[in-house]
Image (cartoon, rainbow, N blue to C red):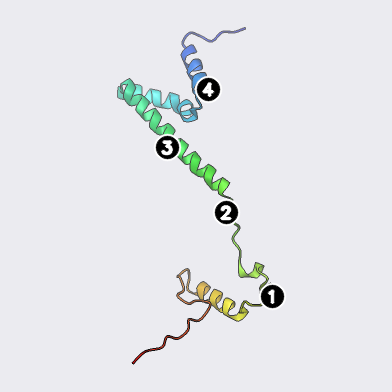
Amino acid sequence: MMRPAATDTPQVLLAHHLRKLKLPTFQREFDKLARGAAKEGLDHPRYLLRRAALELIDRARRIVERRIRAATFPAVKSLDTIDLAALPALNKPVVLALAHSNSSSHGKTSTRSATPEPEKAISP
């Protein structure tokens, strides 16, 4: 059984502790940040501050990714996939005209409504 060298022991223990504490960014970025801190002459609190900031940024990114996956947004549908005959009360020409006017406006929002508004009486 081969034992790690005395200089490797702190890194092995640190990797083990960071894994147990579930700090993957700390573990992944340890060597790079440690060398950078040594070159810059950073004290321990500033070094740990950088490490903690990276961990928080990484966690926030993973939370957003996880929430997007869990949201199960509905699939995008087009009018071609909708059976307009199944909705007899729906005025098919109006729906198609609205769809055409929205697609021809190149992403601009149309101000038309599907049902015409009743005319308002003007009082003298």
In the rendering, at what x and y percent does residue 110 appear?
Answer: 46, 73
The residue sitting at 39% across, 23% down in the picture is: 34
Locate residue 121: give its quadrant: bottom left
Front label number (4 vs 3): 4
Q: Which residue position is annotated with label 4?
A: 20
In the rendering, at what x and y percent does residue 62 appear?
Answer: 50, 39
Q: Secondary structure at mark 1?
A: helix
The quarter of the picture where the N terminus appears is top right
Q: Name the kind of residue labelled 1 in the image.
A: Ala
Q: Is residue 57 left or right of residue 72?
A: left
Q: Which residue position is annotated with label 3?
A: 57
Labels 4 and 3: the sequence-earlier one: 4
Front label number (2 vs 3): 2
Labels 1 and 2: the sequence-earlier one: 2
Q: Name the kind of residue labelled 2 in the image.
A: Phe
Are the two marked residues, 4 and 2, in contact with CB atoms closer than 8 angstroms?
no
Labels 2 and 3: the sequence-earlier one: 3
Compute the Cα span from label 4 to label 2.
34 Å
Q: Secondary structure at mark 3?
A: helix
The quarter of the picture where the C terminus appears is bottom left
- Indicate which disc residue 85 carries: 1
The residue sitting at 46% across, 36% down in the picture is: 58
Locate residue 80: give its quadrant: bottom right
Neighbourhood count class around disc 3 (C-alpha, 10 Å): few under 14, some 14–19, many 20 upward:
few
Labels 4 and 2: the sequence-earlier one: 4
Examine the rendering and report whether any part of residue 39 can be seen: no
Q: Nearer the viewer, residue 40 or 64?
A: 64
Q: Which residue position is annotated with label 2?
A: 73
